Image (cartoon, coloured by chain):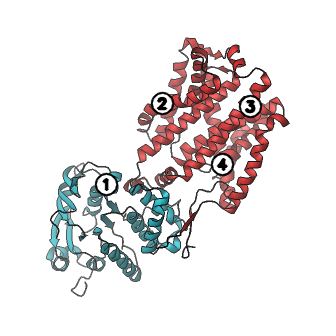
Chain colours: A red, B cyan
């Protein structure tokens, strides 16, 4: 038995990419000093979509839980922030964290019910759950009922005195949340939990007979995803300063676009949702003036990618070149192992 | 033989609707013993493994393992108590490397951290002849390598009882001999084995005792040579396998 066997996790490409990412990150963190308000908002929105897409990818691409009801948590997180700030005086930035905790607590009893459903039934079940959330919040008159409510001005100025400072603060929050989400998912997939997820994805029967608790693994992923999605939702509506049931629980904004991003970028890869979000924002910013034609083009892009590159843009590129920026694999360095 | 059996199955019944797949099967296995199970296709051999491993729940009967009643325990809980299995049709985790497949067994079957499991995994890979392929993707393996991986992954959970389901099936004679050598080495470490196999000479080279199943029932049990000479087995295996006294 060789006592000094080493297990390698990184690759040369990933180490170079890691260094470049740090430079890029420093540049993005300094964005308030080199770009204007409009771009800052756009970037902030981009980070929230990177987070949402990465979370959906974790759920669907890694845990096999294809949900079309994640808007339940986006909206729920938003409402938790508004309620906590308006009725309990919780500082809005702290309320983002609170939204995560409450999001996890509400997901915990939902999961066992939803997990009784499989495949398409699970997908529809999550959507139904999200509609229940929307209809329920439309009944809450103190939060504006069906027409929604705005964050009172005193609370808005409570975040930071000037609008510029507020924009900066929210920008950094979005950057932290987007980056934090990707980092959390990367760490998770490299850990034991990632091993369990990969095993369950390939064979549930073999996983179970090797001691993996399939239910608990999926439950943990579902609840963690719900928590972070709620935090992102809280931040999104803090950026908008206004919330209504239709906007908060929109299947279009928080799930359809997110699925588009993940499928375009490459499901089941960490890079995919980031690449997909870049493509989505480029398309949106250049074509949004075209109105409905923009949506037609989005649909055509989705169809073209699914036909020509079913692994998604990053998935196909990575498959062809072998390049991986977030390596998950373990390489045994042993005299006999190739 | 030791007084307390490692495994004691009594009155095991499994029904799927009107179909009786396992019909009142009882058997015991002493610590360190190796038992072979013979029977034609559809005799309920794999179902018996599914019942022992906890993949399916019995309609009636009890399963005692290491002195405890495990009848109602889930497969993962039985694995943690020391029951490991290979599958007749290999179920490799195709998206992982060989090392990661084995690591999964050690990490979850034994509840080890990755670091603690590392040396054990390398040891298992060396013993099962897979160390050269440690970094290969499990989806790219030959049949023999996939069978070895089934064995390695099960061994990584440090079982006291190993269930082998037709692990020698479909191999060439040379491959079969090398696999027999590996399984004998495993046995020598004190692991008890129950082995379902159609390749009779492979069974005879390893097991102490043989059980014959047909239509879900146990129809014979005893010394391997005597079993092979019995008329029940002769009628089942007529034309399937030459089982003269030259083996073993």
Q: Where is residue B211 in the image (x, y as percent from the top left)?
A: 20, 69
Mark closer to the observer (3, 1): 1
Q: Which of marks 3 and 4 is nearer the N terminus?
A: 4
- Marks 3/1 in contact by CB < 8 Å: the verdict is no
Q: In which quarter of the image is residue B230?
A: bottom left
* Extreme residue in the top direction: A141
Q: Where is residue A48 in the image (x, y as percent from the top left)?
A: 67, 35
| Chain at numbered mark 4 | A
Q: Earlier in the sequence, mark 2 or mark 4?
A: 2
| Chain at numbered mark 2 | A
What residue appears at the point 41 percent right and 54 percent down from the top-left corner? B111
How many numbered badges does the structure rendering display? Answer: 4
Q: Name the residue under label 4.
A: A272
* Extreme residue in the front direction: A3
Q: In which quarter of the image is residue A148?
A: top right
Dot 1 lies on which element? helix
Mark closer to the observer (3, 4): 4
Q: Kindly identify which numbered label has been placed on residue A287.
A: none
Q: Name the residue under label 1.
A: B78
Quote the CA–CA distance across marks 3 and 4.
26 Å
Q: Mark 3 points at which residue?
A: A292
| Chain at numbered mark 1 | B
The answer to whether residue A249 of the structure is visible from this angle is: no
What residue appears at the point 19 percent right and 80 percent down from the top-left corner? B225
Mark closer to the observer (2, 3): 2
Quote the CA–CA distance across marks 3 and 1.
58 Å
What residue appears at the point 46 percent right and 38 percent down from the top-left corner? A121
Q: Position of residue A245 (x, y in %)?
A: 59, 21
Question: Along the horizontal axis of the image, is B72 left or right of B144?
Answer: left
| Chain at numbered mark 3 | A
Q: Which of marks 2 and 3 is nearer the N terminus?
A: 2
């Amino acid at each position: 038995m060789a006592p000094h066997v080493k297990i390698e996790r990184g690759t040369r490409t990933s180490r170079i990419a890691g260094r470049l990412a740090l430079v890029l990150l420093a540049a993005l963190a300094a964005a308030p000093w080199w770009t204007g308000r409009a771009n800052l908002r756009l970037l902030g929105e981009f980070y929230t979509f990177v987070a949402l897409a990465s979370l959906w990818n974790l759920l669907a691409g890694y845990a096999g839980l294809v949900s079309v009801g994640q808007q339940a948590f986006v909206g729920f997180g938003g409402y938790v922030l508004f309620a906590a700030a308006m009725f309990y005086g919780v500082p809005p930035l702290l309320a983002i964290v609170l939204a995560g905790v409450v999001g996890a607590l509400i997901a915990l009893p939902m999961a066992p019910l939803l997990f009784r459903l499989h495949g398409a039934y699970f997908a529809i079940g999550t959507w139904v759950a999200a509609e229940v959330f929307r209809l329920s919040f439309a009944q809450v008159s103190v939060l504006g009922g069906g027409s929604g409510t705005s964050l009172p001005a005193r609370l808005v100025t409570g975040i930071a005195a000037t609008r510029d400072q507020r924009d900066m603060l929210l920008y950094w929050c979005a950057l932290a949340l987007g980056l934090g989400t990707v980092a959390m998912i990367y760490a998770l997939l490299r850990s034991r939990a990632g091993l369990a997820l990969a095993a369950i994805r390939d064979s549930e029967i073999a996983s179970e007979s090797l001691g993996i608790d399939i239910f608990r693994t999926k439950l943990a992923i579902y609840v963690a995803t719900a928590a972070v999605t709620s935090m992102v939702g809280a931040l999104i509506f803090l950026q908008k300063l206004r919330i209504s049931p239709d906007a908060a629980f929109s299947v279009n904004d928080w799930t359809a676009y997110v699925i588009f991003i993940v499928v375009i970028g490459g499901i089941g890869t960490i890079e995919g949702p980031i690449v997909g979000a870049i493509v989505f924002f480029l398309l949106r910013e250049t074509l949004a003036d075209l109105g409905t034609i923009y949506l037609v083009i989005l649909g055509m892009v989705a169809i073209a990618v699914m036909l020509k590159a079913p692994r998604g843009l990053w998935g196909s590129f990575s498959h062809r070149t072998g390049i991986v920026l977030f390596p998950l694999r373990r390489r045994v360095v042993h005299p006999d192992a190739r | 033989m030791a007084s307390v059996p490692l495994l004691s199955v009594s009155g095991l019944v499994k029904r799927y609707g009107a179909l009786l797949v396992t019909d009142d099967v009882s058997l015991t296995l002493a610590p360190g013993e190796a038992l072979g199970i013979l029977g034609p296709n559809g005799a309920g051999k794999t179902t018996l493994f599914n019942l022992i491993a906890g993949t399916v729940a019995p309609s009636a009967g009890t399963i005692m393992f290491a002195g405890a009643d495990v009848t109602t325990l889930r497969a993962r809980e039985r694995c943690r108590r020391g029951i490991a299995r290979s599958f007749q049709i290999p179920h490799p985790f195709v998206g992982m490397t060989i090392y990661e497949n084995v690591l999964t067994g050690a990490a979850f079957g034994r509840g080890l951290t990755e670091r603690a499991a590392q040396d054990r995994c390398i040891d298992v890979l060396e013993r099962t002849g897979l160390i050269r392929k440690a970094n290969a993707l499990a989806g790219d393996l030959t049949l023999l390598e996939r069978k070895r991986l089934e064995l390695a992954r099960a061994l990584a959970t440090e079982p006291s009882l190993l269930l082998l389901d037709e692990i020698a099936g479909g191999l060439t004679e040379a491959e079969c001999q090398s696999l027999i050598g590996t399984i004998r080495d495993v046995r020598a470490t004190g692991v008890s084995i129950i082995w379902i196999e159609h390749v009779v000479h492979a069974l005879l080279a390893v097991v102490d005792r043989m059980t014959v199943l047909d239509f879900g029932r146990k129809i014979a049990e005893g010394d391997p040579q005597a079993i092979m000479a019995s008329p029940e087995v002769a009628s089942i295996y007529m034309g399937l396998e030459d089982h003269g006294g030259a083996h073993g």
